[in-house]
Amino acid sequence: MRRGLGLVGNVVLWVAAVLGAISMVLALATVVAGVQPLIFRSSSMAPAVDAGALALARSVDAQDVKPGDIVSVVNSDGVRVTHRVVKVDQGAGDQVSLTLKGDSNRSPDEEKYLVAEVDRVFFDVPYLGYVANWLASPWAMFAAGIVVALLLASLWSRRSGSGGASAGPGAGTGAGALVAIGLAAASLAPVPRTEAYFSDPATFEAGTVQAHQVRIFDWDAVPCTTNAAGSVTLRYKITSPRYDMTWYRGPKGGAISGTPFLTVVPTTSTIGAVVATTITRAALAGGQPITEGTHVISGRSKLKGAATSAWLSASDRQTEVTVDATTVRCGDINLPPVLAVTGPLDGTTYPSTGAIDDAIEAICGQAAPCGKVTDPNGVYSVEYRLQRANWLSTQCWNPQTDSILPPGFYLTGCGTWRSATTSPVVPNISGSPLTWQVPIGSGGPGTTFNQAGDYTLYLRITDNASPTRATTERTIRFTVR
């Protein structure tokens, strides 16, 4: 019986040793050979590379890239995208402009990628990405700890059973050491995930819809003006060159139509540039009958591209207008909350983790982003996503307030909006300013800046207006050397 259990245990240990060897090879390939492992999370590159595949890429000069190559780039929203090259145009100096397309997509990516060097895929293995993904999880580190403990117990037992004589290490001991080292290496050097994203969300698989989150545009200082000609002009700011703006309408207190009466394609791609859109009564009607009275105009950002079902921002911008027999006039508008970020500020570079810890602790009380929010209707929620990209790939902060795991940056949960700590607590209707901060949690590093890298803080604040809430969204990027 004992012999049978020992045999089973050795088999399990050697299977785990194979997994450990895989993780060691990936870690060594990344550090020593300059090879970039990539895990494919969706099937837009199928059938060439399917979801769950593990691919290996190597950095090459952009001048060496040709149509047909599969390359991995980071788009303007900080999302890694791996698609096939369909066109190469010469840029300035050593740079080239790449047009990419997923094999399963109907059209090329809207964004053109200007690069001097790029990661080119040279090898892939189906389904191995699922294994590498687990090896890079906190549970793998936990498993490595268990194996180390069992390994030490086994060695102690053998020494005791031999009456103090030294016993040679067996096969199980070697396998156990390989498991422990391999899993530890994987947890220290997790494999990046790439969004081989679809331009058609109708074919998205469950769990991958967060590959791109469309951000709502911002109102200008004066969002709506009534013109002498009986029209209105709406003014709003570009948040990404990848977005158009779509406008919908509906009677006040009624349902907003699901069909836009107007789509605006900005003539500039400059982020922060103001777009002015004039809407007449005829344009607002959109060829349909429209009753006199108060109507609500709702605007959303829309991802550019030929998709059968549009990718729209979850939030919208709304304003009321008054419609009579021949004209349309501006009405009430619920402006989104006013957000102030105390620190870190957008575009800031800190020379070290110690420098940013000291700087943010001095203004925020803890080494975590903080700021203030004001809205006359009160605040319903303050949410964040804190992302870090470095040689360990892309990870996201999780304070683990409801978990046995310690706070830290994890590969999972990067698409999850988390609640910030606020004072006073939300939701509230006071209208008074409140402070917010990314929670540090307990039992972790005591800072949200514990490693060098490029950080991105996404913020989403929703007011407590009734019946329609307004949302402010902000992206803060900073670097820690």
Image: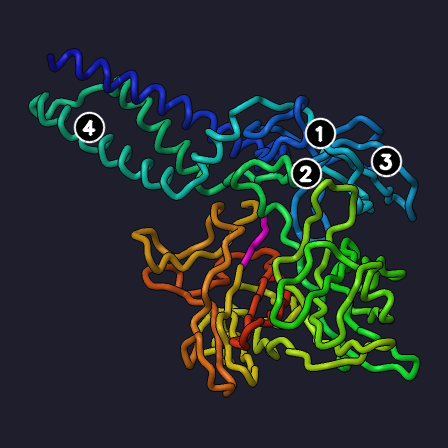
Going from the N terminus, do you reach mark 2 or mark 4 first? 4
Of marks 4 and 1, which one's residue comes earlier in the chain?
1
User: Does the rendering let one see residue 473?
Assistant: yes
Mark 3: give few (<14), some (14-19) or many (20+) Cα within 10 Å: some
Please name the residue that numbered disc 4 is placed on.
Answer: 155
Going from N to C along the chain, the mark reached first, 3 or 1, is 3
What amino acid type should be assigned to the residue bearing mark 2? Phe
Q: Amino acid at mark 3?
A: Gln
- The residue positioned 27% from the left and 36% from the top of the image is 146
Alpha carbon separation for disc pair 2 and 4: 52 Å
Instruction: Give the number of the mark in front: 4 or 3.
Output: 3
State the separation of the CA atoms marked 1 and 2: 8 Å
Characterize the local packing of mark 2: few (<14), some (14-19) or many (20 or more) Cα atoms within 10 angstroms.
Answer: many
Would you name the residue on which mark 1 appears? Answer: 104
207 over 78 or under it: above or below: above
Question: Which residue occupies the foreground of this view, 77 or 44?
Answer: 44
Q: Nearer the viewer, mark 3 or mark 1?
A: 1
Query: Which of marks 3 and 4 precedes in the sequence?
Result: 3
**Residue 184: where, in percent of width, then height?**
40, 38
Mark 3 and mark 1: Cα distance apart in space: 26 Å
Please report contact status of discs 1 and 2: CB closer than 8 Å, yes or no. Answer: yes
What is the distance, in whole Å, between disc 4 and disc 3 at their CAs?
55 Å
- The kind of residue tagged 1 is Ser
- Residue for badge 3: 63
Q: Residues within 10 Å of mark 4 (few under 14, many from 20)?
A: some
* Helix, strand or loop at mark 1: loop
Amino acid under disc 4: Leu
Q: Which mark is residue 198?
A: 2
N-terminal of the pair, mark 3 or mark 2, is 3
Quadrant where the N terminus is found in the figure: top left
